[in-house]
Amino acid sequence: MNNIRWTRRLFPMAILVTGLLGGASRVVAQETVLWNFCVNSSCTDGDFPDGGLIADGAGNLYGTTEAGGANGQGSVFEIPVGGGLRTLYSFCAQQGCPDGAAPYGGALVFDSSGNLFGTTSSYGKGGGTVFELSPAGGGAWTFNTLYKFCSLPKCADGQYPNGQLAILGSNKLVGTTTGGHGVLFQLLQTQPSVWTETVVYRFCSRVNCADGSDPTGLSVDRVGNLYGTTRGGGAHNGGTVFEIPLNGAQAVLYSFCPVAGCADGLAPTGGVILANGLLYGTTEDGGANGKGTLYSLHQGVETVLHNFGVGLDGTLPVSTLVDSLGNLYGTTSSGGAHNGGTVFEIPFNGAETVLYSFCGLANCLDGSSPQFGPLLFLNGHLFGTTTGGGRYNGGTVFQIH
């Protein structure tokens, strides 16, 4: 990744950032808009990128848009290191949209062979799909629908997948759905072109949904244990952090909102990350200011590392955090100096710094409302998406450096 070179020449929209912390103005970072999405029906590049980004070994970026594309139902795109954008697939390319539509809520994921996997939140058989894009040589990609949800009566197999998939081994995918109270599912490749779905766990299986409801993302550790969050349910109906050990039973590690005012946070979103032997995540509500929190969790003990809503630090954090060299990074979808959201940095044992406040230019040319965490490269650059703003008001792909 260290050979990545994004420059002003390739991307001329470079913006000097003034970060605001505690009322003091100072230069913190620089933003470059790498791509402006278009909302017009004639624009086939997509609209409303809301699934985060991933990168291959050469530094090319990949993501999805919830709308737009050739058929108006979303797309998978690539932004090569050299600049520009390529649409790899436009959804609803088949009659009746059995290939799915509206990918939402989770970044793509690569396997060891360079295949891309992701989900759509609608169509298929009515409940969304899991799909694969495989490189076919010469820059071409082959699309394949691996599973269509609502294939069983009453959608017993799950409905509306969201969050990033996790890959276990060479032939297994796991993910979550939000329909009903949500399920954790597994797709197992039994033959080269055959994937079989199994529901691993159904949320709200305990009285009053003490195990949580509406899961919002997964992480996996080195031995295959799964960790995630639910936006609702739990002992106090404020959401949970849960663990499903490899070949084990679901366990609630923490239930939010045990005290008046939900000072520990409310409605965790975006899942968790594992770093330094702890779990880290964000809640989009609750905390000392009722504007969300950044928290850590260790052996069932939750610690609030930051309460959002202080000055211009941003509000409504909705991203999974990324760690590197002892720092945490994330986004808020609102607040900041211009109320267009922020990119922030918080050292594991330090105070928050706002690296960038969006919508700092007229008509939000720099983008607004980032919904998923930025991607951190080894060279220290951050890349992410905004769901609004940009030159055509269809969202952006941005770089913070």
Image: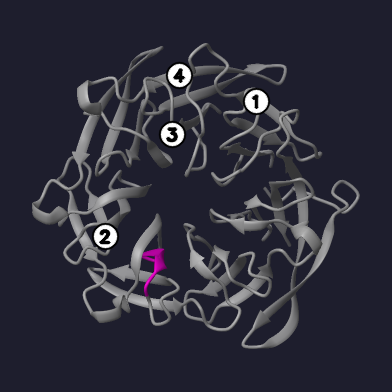
Q: What is the magenta range?
A: 276-286
Hey, what amino acid is under mark 3?
Ser
Q: Which residue is mark 1?
A: 88
The residue positioned 21% from the left and 21% from the top of the image is 153
| Residue 303 versus residue 45 in the image, above or below | below
Q: Which of the 4 image quadrants contains residue 259?
A: bottom left
Looking at the picture, tell me which residue is in the foreground, 306 or 173. Answer: 306
Res. 121 mark: 3
Cβ atoms under marks 1 and 4 closer than 8 Å: no
Q: Are marks 1 and 3 in contact (CB under 8 Å)?
A: no
Q: Residues under labels 1 and 3: Cα distance?
A: 18 Å
Tell me the kind of residue under disc 2.
Thr
Question: Within 10 Å of the Cα at label 1, are there few (<14), some (14-19), or many (20+) other Cα atoms?
Answer: many
Q: Which residue is mark 2?
A: 240
Callout 4 amino acid:
Thr
Q: Where is residue 32? Give x, y as percent.
A: 78, 56
Could you tell me which secondary element the residue under label 1 belongs to? strand
Residue at 61 percent across and 79 percent down: it is: 312
Disc ID at residue 145: 4
Q: Earlier in the sequence, mark 3 or mark 4?
A: 3
Q: CA distance from mark 3 to mark 4?
A: 13 Å
